[in-house]
């Protein structure tokens, strides 16, 4: 058994196991940091910041380019670690790494992204300018479902902007983050600029409380996101906390049946539904029977198995407890009158009896009052709701407390335009099931899917990780003092400006 992490000197070390979700076997353990370890990590990051903020943009960019090349070279190694500890199929893991690299590439443009503004002669002999400066020590707290991509939403931008960064990854799949730390070191990043701090709630709360941490970014469930945001801001920190989701796809009667069904299957069951952008609710406008039949046929044709097996379309869930929790929603759906069209509890994986497997689940005739609709399930459960009009569909989406992502499938441009304008959701797809923005745009939801007013990566990521400073400058001539006349205490006005 491999121990992930290092022993904690001078404290009562705690550890938690790491599992292979495909076999149920323990493959390692991770030592959990205590408050003293957080103090040491923050102190090291604070010491490193003094030199890193003074490192030129040119030198920072060279390190970022080198880091990008190293990540690209090790993308298969990272993908294998993701599959081994999270369980998602290997090709999906490769895609996760690719999307993370896109944010690194965006951050490589930091000399342009940090350019300030300048205005000459805003008043007589006075110039005005603005600059953006780093915050100091910032922290990221990230979930298990994307152990490479979600941290990369945060730290490339933060580090490029001149901050030092402490990453607290999920304790369920910590190995990818440790490899990333090694690659940063190989790229030439100075010690202390990037730190991986393994831990659980004790480490999280210590980071949120620590006076030496200037800002915190978080991605996870809504209850925890609310806690993170409130606790961080109460201690004077800048905070952004991305919470849960209940993502809807509205399907109009004129949508292409085949391509729509294909897109919904990929969006509902990719990564075993363990995505904050997964489509979990399909809202059919009009006759839903043809779409449900198409979804059923495709769901039954999927192969559930180990993520490392190229024949697998969908891997296991992250833990046995989570698998059983997700399966329980089928019980409640049946009890509340929904139709379980495809029952993932019946899936059999050869040699996988001890793995955390649940096959694709399709539930029809769901109503908004049912638990299978109300909760963020975070698993391979696709619910179908039926409405008569686009107005009803938009009202249903807007009534949901979450506002992360949504999509509409239609050939009607006016319907798509109206949906785009009126739906109260942060990320919208038009004939695109999972509208995750490219790295140079920003990712974030509305309502209870986001706490704080900043989204991640893109220009909002730059703004979150820097402070704006405005500078007003006058250089008086040597003889100006004698010719200035009497002192005036009021704002200059009219021609005097």
Image (cartoon, helix red, strand yellow):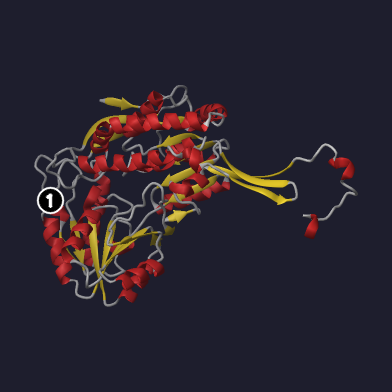
Q: Is residue 37 visible?
A: no
Q: Is residue 83 visible?
A: yes
Is 46 above or below relative to 132?
above
Q: Residue at x 54, y 30 (%)?
A: 49
Q: Nearer the viewer, residue 216 or 257?
A: 257
Figure quadrant of residue 246: bottom left
Q: Residue furthest left?
A: 350
- In which quadrant of the rendered image does the C terminus lie? bottom right
Q: Which residue is mark 1?
A: 347
Count neighbours of disc 1 (C-alpha within 10 A) and say few if under 14, some if 14 to 19, many if 20 or more. some
Q: Nearer the viewer, residue 299 or 116?
A: 116
Using residue 4 as the reference point, say whether residue 123 is left or right of it: right
Figure quadrant of residue 178: top left
Is 433 above or below relative to 205?
below
Q: Nearer the viewer, residue 419 or 379?
A: 419
Q: Residue at x 36, y 39 (%)?
A: 170
Where residue 351 appears, as percent x and y from the top left, is 10, 39
Q: Residue furthest bottom?
A: 388
Numbered circles on residues, count: 1
Q: Residue at x 20, y 38 (%)?
A: 24
- In which quadrant of the rendered image does the N terminus lie? top left
Where residue 116 appears, as percent x and y from the top left, is 57, 44
Q: Residue at x 38, y 37 (%)?
A: 169
Where residue 282 appears, as percent x and y from the top left, is 26, 65
Q: Mark 1 falls on what kind of element? A: loop
Using residue 283 as the reference point, say whether residue 421 is left or right of it: right
Where residue 129 appears, as percent x and y from the top left, is 64, 45
């Amino acid at each position: 058994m491999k121990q992930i992490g290092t022993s904690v000197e001078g404290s009562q070390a705690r550890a938690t196991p790491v599992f292979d979700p495909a076999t149920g076997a323990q493959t390692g353990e991770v030592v959990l940091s205590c408050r003293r370890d957080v103090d040491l990590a923050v102190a090291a990051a604070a010491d490193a910041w003094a030199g890193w903020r003074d490192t030129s943009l040119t030198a920072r960019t060279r390190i970022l380019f080198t880091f990008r090349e190293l990540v690209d070279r090790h993308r298969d190694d990272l993908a294998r670690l993701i599959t081994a500890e999270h369980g998602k199929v290997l090709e999906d893991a490769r895609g996760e790494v690719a999307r993370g690299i896109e944010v690194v590439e965006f951050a490589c443009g930091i000399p342009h992204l940090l350019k300030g503004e300048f205005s000459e002669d805003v008043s007589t002999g006075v110039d005005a300018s603005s600059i953006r400066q780093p915050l100091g020590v910032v922290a990221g707290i990230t979930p298990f479902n994307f152990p490479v991509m979600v941290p990369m939403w945060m730290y490339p931008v933060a580090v490029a902007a001149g901050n030092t960064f402490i990453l607290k990854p999920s304790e369920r799949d910590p190995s990818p983050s440790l490899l990333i730390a090694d690659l940063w070191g190989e790229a030439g990043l100075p010690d202390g600029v990037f730190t991986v701090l393994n831990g659980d709630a004790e480490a999280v709360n210590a980071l949120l409380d620590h006076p030496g941490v200037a800002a915190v970014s978080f991605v996870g469930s809504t209850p925890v996101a609310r806690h993170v945001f409130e606790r961080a801001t109460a201690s004077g920190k800048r905070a952004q906390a991305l919470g849960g989701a209940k993502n809807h796809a509205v399907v109009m009667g004129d949508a292409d049946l085949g391509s729509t069904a294909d897109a919904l299957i990929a969006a509902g069951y990719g990564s075993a539904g363990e995505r904050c952008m997964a489509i979990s609710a399909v809202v059919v406008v009009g006759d839903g029977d043809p779409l449900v039949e198409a979804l059923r046929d495709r769901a039954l044709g999927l192969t559930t198995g180990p993520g490392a097996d190229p024949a697998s379309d969908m891997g296991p869930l992250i833990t046995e407890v989570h698998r059983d929790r997700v399966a329980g929603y089928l019980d409640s759906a049946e009890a509340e009158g929904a139709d379980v069209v495809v029952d993932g509890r019946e899936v059999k994986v050869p040699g996988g009896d001890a793995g955390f497997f649940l096959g694709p689940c399709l539930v029809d005739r769901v109503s908004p009052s049912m638990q299978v609709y109300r909760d963020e399930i975070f698993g391979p459960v696709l619910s179908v709701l039926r409405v008569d009009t686009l107005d009803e569909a938009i009202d249903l989406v807007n009534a949901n407390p979450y506002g992360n992502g949504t999509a509409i499938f239609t050939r009607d441009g006016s319907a798509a335009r109206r949906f785009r304008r009126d739906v109260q959701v942060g990320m919208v797809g038009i004939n695109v099931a999972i509208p995750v923005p490219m790295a140079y745009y920003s990712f974030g939801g509305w309502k209870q899917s986001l706490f704080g007013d900043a989204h991640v990566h893109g220009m909002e990521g730059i703004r979150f990780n820097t402070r704006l400073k405005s500078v007003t400058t006058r250089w008086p001539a040597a003889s100006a003092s004698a010719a200035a006349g009497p002192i005036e205490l009021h704002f200059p006005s009219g021609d005097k400006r």
